[in-house]
Each structure stands twice: as structure tokens, then as C-alpha cells.
Image (spheres, rainbow, N blue to C red):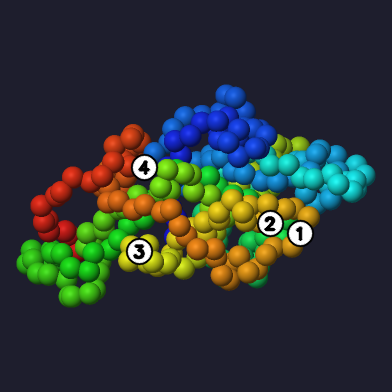
Amino acid sequence: MCGRFAVTTDPALLAARIDAINEIPADAATGPNYNVAPTDGIATLVSRHPEGHQDGGSASLDEGQEKLGPPHEHGDQPTRRLRLMRWGLVPPWTEAGPDGAPASGGPLLINARADKVTTSPAFRVAAERRRCLVPMSGYYEWRAEPGGSVRLDAGEVKPAPSGQARRGARKTPFYIHGDGAMLYAAGLWSVWRPNRLSDAVLSVAIITTEAVGELAGIHDRMPLLLPENHWDTWLNPDSDVDTTLLARPPDVTGIAVREVSTLVNSVRNNSPELIAPAKPQPEQAYLL
């Protein structure tokens, strides 16, 4: 899965680099974030037609005004737009709680499995016309260590069975990042309103797939990372989802991996120290 990541590039600079219109409000908190967590607002890349077009992919429809304006004209291409979205997709049918926020009816939908997005009720509508990319400087993943010491109830300390990660055993965090470039994870986004008069809440889930290569030795899942030559196909609001990208993701290249400090375990920590190489630590015993 992907449950934590880092973004260190300013949205305005990022938008300029990827030829996108920056629609993130100037007063939004968009400074470097070394520990992005679920429910945080994150920069999300979408592709939409100009406002007012009746195409299922227009800016006006995004705001909940259905079927306004004429169909887009031939040759009118959608444009890339960078928007701020809540990490944790809220399906449109979600009821509002007493405070007007989405009512919790289950786990937060921060990830969507690539093999489920076209069939899952929570994701299939978004997969049709609301596909996106989540830019990240890198993401964190934790490897459960198969060995190590585990403290039992009576205080006895004994090693975990070989090749098996015991509950309570040490988990080692790794920072997985582009070798000098941003990573772009495929995602799905949604528009939710507690009522017709309320502002729209834009939310997003990151698509995950089976981990490959060195990454499979850390965790069995990873974000579905797309190189730039696949962006327009994935983002296009006028076309159906390319299921080949979901079933056979592009090769992952230019990825670097390093072990980092356990400081990243707490969402309260947020500094460049989180992505720095970990310092060697002595062996420790961990509570079961």
C-alpha cells in the first residue's frame, strides 16, 4: 500500500514543469511536506475541458453543475490542471455526518487496488472519467523484519522464527524516490457535497499494484507509477480507462531506495531529516 509520502516542490513550480494550470488557492498550505498523511490536502493533476462544456470532463461538471453548456467543439482539447484534493476518496453517495463532514462508514479509501478499480462500487465511476496523477517526491514503505527479538508476556526474549515477521517485531522504514525526478502515481478522484448548497469536496485515492524488483523485498504493494508518455492517455476524460495500464503497469525505472529514520512513523514529525539516510542502530528487543 501507500500510506505516507513526501512532496517538496512548490505547486506553482510543479505546474510550470508539467505544463499545467495551477488551480491551487494561493492561501493554501503548500509548503514542503515530508510526511504527507491520509486526509491531508495534496496537489493532484487532472485533465479537464474548459468550463461550461458538456462532456463529462468539464470544469463546470466538476463543481456539480451537471450538463451545462454545449458539447465541446472538435479539436477542443482538455488541459492539465493542478488541484488541491483531500487524500482519502469520498464516494459521491457518502452521507454527511452531524458536523457536515463525510460520515465514516468504513476504512479511509486512501488506496485503490489496480485489479479492483473497474469493478469496485467505490471506484468504478471515478475510473471511467475521473482519473488523475498524484505527484510525489518519494513515498515511504515499511518492511517487516523476519528476524529480530520479540519480548513475550513473561518477559522472556527469543528470536522470531526464521523468515517470519512476528507481530510487534521491528518494521524498517524506507524512502522510495525518483533518481533526480518526481514520481507520478496513478489515482482516482471524486466530487462530494454534503448538500446542494455546500462547496464541493475533491478527494483522491492512489492506485496500487503488485510490487516489482527490489521494491517487492520491502512490501508486496506499490503505487502504480506512470512515466510521462502515459500521462495523457491516463488523464484523458473523453476516453475509457486503459485497462492494460492496470493489468500490466509500465516498467519502473529511475527509482532509488534508502532506509530512513523511524521518525517518519509519527505524523507529528515533518522535516528534511525524515528523508535522510538512517543512522545505524543497535539491535533492540520489541514488545509483542
Q: Nearer the viewer, residue 143 or 250?
A: 250
- The residue under label 1 is 239
For label 4, the residue is 267
Secondary element under disc 4, as helix, strand or loop, is: loop
> On the image, which quarter does residue 215 sit in?
bottom left
> Cα distance, mark 2 to mark 4?
34 Å
Give the spatial CA distance, label 3 vs label 1: 34 Å
Residue 214 badge: 3
Going by the numbered disc 2, the residue's amino acid type is Thr
Q: Earlier in the sequence, mark 2 or mark 4?
A: 2
Residue pictured at 55% horizontal, 65% vertical? 249
Whichever of labels 1 and 4 marks the residue nearer the N terminus, that label is 1
Residue at 33% across / 35% down in the picture? Answer: 272
Q: CA distance from mark 3 to mark 2?
A: 28 Å
The residues tagged by marks 1 and 2 sit, at their Cα atoms, a distance apart of 8 Å
Query: How far across and how far down the image is residue 172, in percent?
Result: 26, 56
Considering only order in the chain, which callout, 2 or 1, is on the residue closer to the N terminus?
2
> Dot 1: what SS?
loop
